Amino acid sequence: MKRHLILTVMLSVFLAALAATPATAKTLSTVSAAPLPQVQRTAQLPTQYQTTTTRTRTASCPAGTWVIGGGAHISGGQGRVALTILAPTFSRTGSNYFFAAAIRTDPTFTGSWSLQPYAICAALPNPNQIDLIITSSTSSPATASSATFQHAEAVCPAGKRAISAGAQIVPVGAQTGAVALQLVRTSGPRDIGRATAREAGGNTGTWYVQSHVMCGPVGLVGSNEPIGTLGSTADAGVACPAGTRAHGAGGGGSITDSGLTFLDGVIPSSALTYVSISMTTPPAAGMVAQAVCI
């Protein structure tokens, strides 16, 4: 009974946070949309298992499609390797791919680990309708912070809704420790993308986090709220309703500092019917898996 009460309170807190929007948000009526044409997940082969400190990897979209979201997964990290970049690289006329990066958060960890990225791609009727908005937690690299925790939000233009969210940690100068992502997802109304990041300990360098959000017109991508599931462990998953597909995958801890726990998996299933999220340790305030299902 006590566990049920705790989870109920956690869910109430999460739903309130999910619905929170900035003062500039626009209110739009709920509109349903069909899945985008040829929506699909592509996966790059994982990197080789190595003991390196950092890894990067990209997953590309097939010709005739554009990136609209993605994810990545760390294998062998044993809770001591975390994601630092989950970023769509969108071009209306050039190559489209999803970029992922990870870092060893525990300097004493000597195990071998691997990184695998995923791209969510679709054939867009008019790529000019899509925007990739990037907003940093600081106004410029010159004002990068050494704060333990940072939060950024990227806002969709008026009349558009988020398809997916991404994030990137940007170090400025030398770093003496690791910084990793805790949260990457859209808001409940899908008007913004959210990203949070935290130092893993011992870092004296300056850095900032960027929030990335892919936005499209309501008539094309709909305005229904994303599907979210709360978890009390280090893993959570959420399924899309029948007839819809996950166009965006996200989740993680709270929009405030979740402590020494970090994202190590954001995985859209191969059929885009399910999204799995994993963190290095269970966040004290719980975690969420989120899917933007269209």
Image (cartoon, helix red, strand yellow):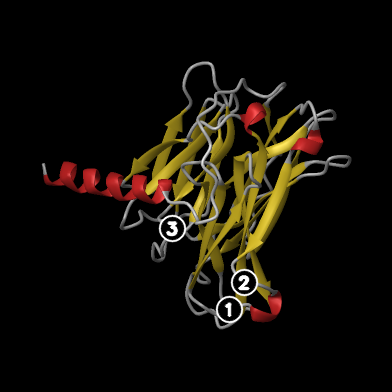
Horizontal side, residue 231 vs residue 26: left or right:
left
Classify 201 as above or below 259: below
- Closer to the chain start, of discs 2 and 1, is 2
In terms of depth relative to the viewer, which is nearer, 110 or 132?
Answer: 132
Horizontal side, residue 243 vs residue 45: left or right:
left
- What distance separates the C-alpha of mark 3 from that of mark 1? 18 Å
Which label is found at residue 145? 1
Where the N terminus falls, by quadrant?
top left
Q: Position of residue 206 (x, y in %)?
A: 61, 79
Residue at 48% x, 34% y: name it. 225
Which label is found at residue 138? 2
Q: Residues within 10 Å of mark 1 (few under 14, many from 20)?
A: some
Classify 104 as above or below 128: below
In terms of depth relative to the viewer, which is nearer, 201 or 88?
Answer: 88
Q: Amino acid at mark 3?
A: Ile
Do we see residue 11 in this rendering?
yes
Q: Residues within 10 Å of mark 3 (few under 14, many from 20)?
A: many
Q: Secondary structure at mark 1?
A: loop
